[in-house]
Image (spheres, rainbow, N blue to C red):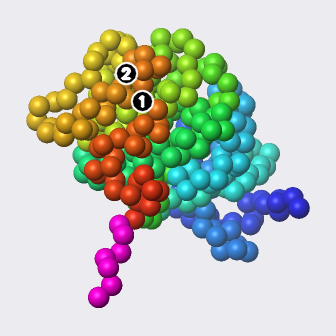
Amino acid sequence: SQPAKLSLQDFDIGRALGKGKFGNVYLAREKQTKLIVALKVLFKKQLDKHNVAQQLKNEIEIQYHSRHDNILKCYGFFYDEKRVYLILEYAPGGEMYKAMQKEGTFSEEKTAKYVVQLARALKYCHDRKVIHRDIKPENLLLDGAGNLKIADFGWSCLTTKPRQTFCGTLDYLAPEMVVGTAYDHSVDVWSLGVLMYECLVGKAPFEGATHDATFARITRDAIEFPRHVHMAEDAQELLRNILVKDPAKRLSLDAILASAWVARCAPGAATGALVRPAPPAG
Ligand SMILES: COCCOc1ccc(Nc2ncc(Cl)c(NC3CC3)n2)cc1
C-alpha cells in the first residue's frame, strides 16, 4: 500500500536543530505515532534560485531507499506551495563537526569506530552504484549511542560527472575531483582517509589558506604527520595507503576494514560486532 500522505498538520514542531542554505531543520514529533523526527524544511524559491531541485530529488531517492544503520533514514517527504519537507531520522548526538570542534581530536578507539561505520555505510552505497562524493564532518551525524550516520546525499550520484561547482570546504575533495578527471567510488575512500586523519590530528591533512592553496596541496603534497601528534605507526601506514593520489592504488574499503590498525583499535569490527563482548558470568 502507498505510505500515508503526510502534511505539516501531522507534526508538532520543536526547536531548530540547524540552519542551512536552503532552509532549516527542526525537531518534530508525528502526532499519531509520537515518532520523533528531524523535519528538514526547504524553500522552493531557494531551490530554484540555486537550481538544485534535481539534486534534492537525487537525495530523497537515494536516502529513502537506503536501509543501513549508518545512513540517516529518510521516512518520506511532502510539500506545500512554498516549501518542501523531508521527514528524516533524528540523530540525538548532533553534528560530527561540532563534536570535533569540541573535542579537538578523538581517541584511536573512537576514530576506528567511526572509520569502520563509515566504511560499512560506503560499502553499502558503492554496492548499489551510489557514490556519495561529499563525505565530510558537516555531513555526518551521531545517534544517541555515538554511532555515525551519513546525513546528506545532496551530492551523491549514480553517474560520475559533476554537474555543479562545489561549495563549502574543499579539504575532503579527492585529487581526481579537484583536477576534474573522471572518477569513481574511490573518491569516497579518499574522504574517509581525510576524516580519519582529522579525527586523530585535529585538522585536515591538506588544509590551505585559500581554495587554490588547498587544491594545490591535495594534488601535490604527500601526507605529513605533525611531530607533536604521536600517531601510531600502523595508523600512519593505513593513512599513507588511503591518501594515495592515484585512485587505482588507493586501498579498498574491505582492505581498510581488514587493516592492522582497525584490528587493534576496533576489536570485533571484522566480525561485525562493535560492542564490547560481555565479561564472562561468575
Ligand atoms: C544546541 O543544539 C545544538 C544542535 O544539537 C543538535 C543538532 C542536530 C541534531 N540532530 C539531527 N538529526 C537529524 C538531522 Cl537531519 C539534523 N540536522 C541538523 C542540521 C543538523 N540534526 C541533534 C542535536
Q: Is residue 281 magenta?
A: yes
Q: Is residue 130 above or below residue 30?
A: above
The residue that mark 2 highlights is 244
Question: Crowding near pointer 1: few (<14 within 10 Å), some, many (20+)?
Answer: many
- Pick the quarter of the image with the C terminus: bottom left
Amino acid carrying mark 1 in the image = Leu
The residue that mark 1 highlights is 251
Name the residue at 55% across, 41% down: 123
Magenta span covers which residues? 276-282
Residue furthest out toward the right:
1
- Pick the quarter of the image with the N terminus: bottom right
Tell me the SS state at disc 2.
loop
Query: Is most of the magenta stretch helix, strand or loop?
Result: loop
Q: Is residue 14 magenta?
A: no
Q: CA distance from mark 1 to mark 2?
A: 8 Å
Residue furthest out toward the left:
228
- Where's residue 243, x and y in %? 36, 26
Q: Tell me whether circle 1 and circle 2 mark residues in contact (CB < 8 Å).
A: yes
Tell me the SS state at disc 1.
loop
Of 28 and 124, nearer the camera is 124
Of 254 and 48, nearer the camera is 254
- In this picture, residue 86 sits left or right of residue 124: right
- Where's residue 58, x and y in %? 70, 36
